[in-house]
Image (cartoon, grey):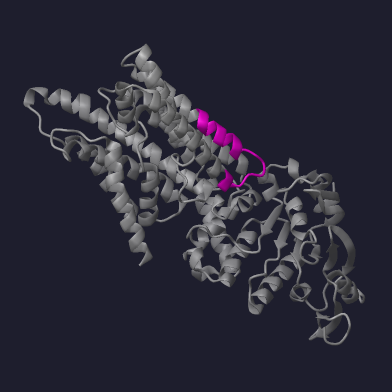
């Protein structure tokens, strides 16, 4: 049996459009795979298929060798956790209650759930606002609470859907650094983003590099290491700009420039 | 602490309710108190608790503060069923209350099952379900109006009386018949508390955290329909209880599902028992339909709470 998440020739069509075209991908525990691509490339669709929220028209999404759509929600929640772009906060429940709900999959007492939730909140530095309503938290604080939920769910695989989209640079740095720690601690991470530079926060200098998968119009355009010399060039093709890689303090950074070289 | 005070107040209200009302002579005291007021109060508690809990659950489930049995078609279905029974039954078997009850039950369940079937679909947004409920309500309402239009004046009076919401029972037969339905609904829905807590962050997020979303919403709507159908069948569509009580609880005790759901049962029971008691004393010598009282008392209460929390 293969552990981890495997997408096997996944194709998704909707209203005559092909959203994903024969996409194959593997994320084992201990892998960091970043899906990058322009808007509308199929990144979110790919994540929804991996989560079992969307059934592919052909191909399979497998978790630990089993089809995700055949797993019960509880079994799936034991293997995959999901960090959305932004935590919906329809009601002013406390941060603690928010994190407790991530413990739903565990057959345990309320007290045990609360203990685990407190621990997860403390781990992300959110212990001080455990009892505050999530509707009153700032975007950065709320995303920390969401990460605490991710930790509390205790899954070997973590799926991130542009989790830093609404965060300021300090919170982006914090979030991706934490994801880097989770990765090096042995979790498998699948991260969807259109901002390739956030990955440098997860990639501590001198350690293994994340894998970068370029998605374009529903197809895998390339799969390269974050270290690969031609990554900038390939990213530029993907986004339709000229992209140069440079290094700052040992971190790899990509800068997008107009294709003609001069002013656009 | 707040929770215990509220619980004590509610229990006291339920205990006091049968004593409220016009005085009665000593020789009729036994009958009026034990055969009229106590069963009426028990009925009010059952109906109030069940309706309020279903309202609170629907609001959680649909993530919509306006979702209630009356907005997703349950009440309209019951009204249609009852009207059919009143208009046909009045011709066939005069005074057949159980017939009206059975027909209202079938009507409520019928419409709710249509809505629940829609909610069970794979890729359904809850707003679509609310929309479908409103459409079903309108269709049932139109049929009901058509029936009323073709009814004669005696039938029309009976229909109007029924549709105002009332707690008319003498003796304990209604209480006994309603108890199993109310018990199944309340116990079943309270058992879903944990799953409904997870629903707050959205259905897809809940699904990713291990909640069988489709099953939970089908079961919740089914149980809600069962309880509401039973209540409406006996008492008519008692307006606003299911909408007002959860909001009262939400604004006084908070939104945590573990407080909101049981709190709605207790507060709803006390609220309707008190409304029923007030219906006996507001107009001397006459008794108002309890549905009028719930709307008249509950609406200003809700408005004042909303206004206060805004400022």
Depth order, front residue of B295/B148:
B148
- Which residue occupies 34% across, 27% down? B159
- Left or right of residue B284, residue B6 in this image: right
In this view, A40 is above or below B124: below
Residue B87, x across and y down, in percent: 38, 20
Residue B114, x across and y down, in percent: 56, 32
Q: What span is in magenta?
A: B110-128
Total number of numbered discs in the rendering: 0
- Left or right of residue B300, residue B87 in this image: right
- Left or right of residue A221, residue A251 in this image: left
- Which residue occupies 40% across, 17% down? B88
In this view, A21 is above or below A143: above
Please identify the residue farthest to the top as the structure is shown.
B92
- Which residue occupies 34% across, 42% down? B268
- Which residue occupies 81% across, 48% down? A16
Residue B195, x across and y down, in percent: 55, 46
Residue A46, x across and y down, in percent: 78, 55
Image quarter of the C terminus of chain A: bottom right
Residue B170 lies in the magenta-colored region? no
Depth order, front residue of B305/A155:
B305
Whether residue A128 appears in this view of the structure is: yes
Please identify the residue farthest to the right as the structure is shown.
A230
Whether residue B20 appears in this view of the structure is: no
Depth order, front residue of B307/B148:
B148
């Amino acid at each position: 049996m293969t552990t981890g998440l495997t997408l096997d020739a996944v194709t998704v069509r909707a209203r005559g459009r092909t959203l994903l075209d024969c996409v194959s991908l593997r994320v084992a525990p201990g892998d960091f795979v970043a899906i990058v691509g322009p808007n509308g490339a199929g990144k979110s669709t790919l994540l929804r298929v991996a989560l079992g929220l969307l059934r592919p028209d052909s191909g399979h999404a497998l978790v630990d060798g089993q089809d995700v759509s055949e797993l019960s929600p509880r079994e799936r929640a034991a293997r995959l956790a999901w960090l959305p772009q932004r935590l919906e906060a329809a009601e002013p429940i406390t941060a603690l209650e928010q994190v407790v709900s991530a413990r739903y999959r565990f057959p345990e007492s309320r007290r045990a759930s609360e203990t685990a939730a407190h621990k997860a909140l403390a781990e992300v530095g959110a212990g001080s606002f455990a009892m505050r309503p999530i509707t009153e938290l700032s975007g950065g604080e709320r995303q920390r609470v969401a990460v605490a939920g991710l930790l509390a769910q205790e899954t070997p695989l973590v799926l991130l859907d542009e989790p830093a989209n609404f965060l300021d640079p300090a919170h982006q740095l914090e979030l991706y650094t934490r994801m880097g720690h989770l990765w090096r601690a042995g979790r498998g991470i699948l991260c969807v983003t259109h901002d390739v530079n956030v990955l440098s926060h997860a990639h501590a200098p001198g350690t293994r590099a994340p894998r970068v998968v370029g998605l374009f119009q529903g197809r895998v355009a390339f799969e390269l290491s974050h270290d690969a010399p031609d990554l900038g060039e390939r990213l530029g093709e993907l986004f339709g700009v000229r992209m140069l890689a440079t290094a700052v303090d040992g971190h790899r950074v990509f800068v997008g420039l107009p294709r003609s070289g001069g002013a656009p | 602490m707040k929770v215990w005070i509220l619980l004590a107040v509610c229990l006291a209200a339920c205990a006091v309710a049968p004593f409220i009302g016009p005085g009665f002579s000593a020789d009729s005291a036994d009958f009026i108190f034990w055969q009229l007021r106590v069963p009426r109060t028990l009925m009010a508690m059952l109906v109030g608790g069940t309706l309020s809990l279903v309202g609170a659950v629907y609001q959680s489930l649909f993530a919509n503060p306006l979702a209630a049995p009356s907005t997703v078609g349950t009440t309209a279905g019951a009204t249609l069923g009852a009207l059919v029974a009143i208009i046909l039954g009045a011709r066939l078997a005069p005074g057949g209350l159980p017939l009206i009850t059975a027909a209202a039950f079938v009507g409520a369940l019928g419409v709710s099952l249509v809505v629940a079937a829609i909610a069970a679909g794979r890729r359904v947004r809850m707003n679509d379900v609310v929309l479908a409920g409103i459409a079903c309500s309108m269709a049932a309402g139109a049929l009901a109006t058509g029936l009323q239009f073709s009814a004669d004046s005696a039938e029309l009076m009976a229909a109007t009386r029924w549709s105002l919401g009332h707690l008319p029972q003498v003796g304990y037969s209604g209480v006994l018949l309603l108890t199993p339905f109310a018990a199944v609904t309340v116990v079943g829905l309270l058992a879903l508390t944990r799953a409904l807590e997870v629903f707050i962050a959205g259905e897809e997020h809940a699904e990713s955290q291990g909640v069988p979303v489709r099953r939970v919403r089908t079961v919740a709507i089914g149980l809600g329909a069962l309880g509401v159908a039973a209540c409406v069948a006996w008492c008519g569509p008692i307006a606003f209880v299911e909408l007002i009580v959860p909001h009262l609880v939400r604004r006084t005790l908070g939104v945590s599902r573990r407080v909101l759901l049981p709190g709605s049962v207790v507060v709803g029971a006390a609220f309707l028992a008190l409304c029923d008691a007030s219906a006996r004393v507001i107009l001397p010598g006459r008794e108002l339909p309890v549905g009028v009282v719930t709307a008249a008392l509950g609406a200003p209460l809700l408005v004042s709470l909303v206004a206060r929390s805004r400022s």
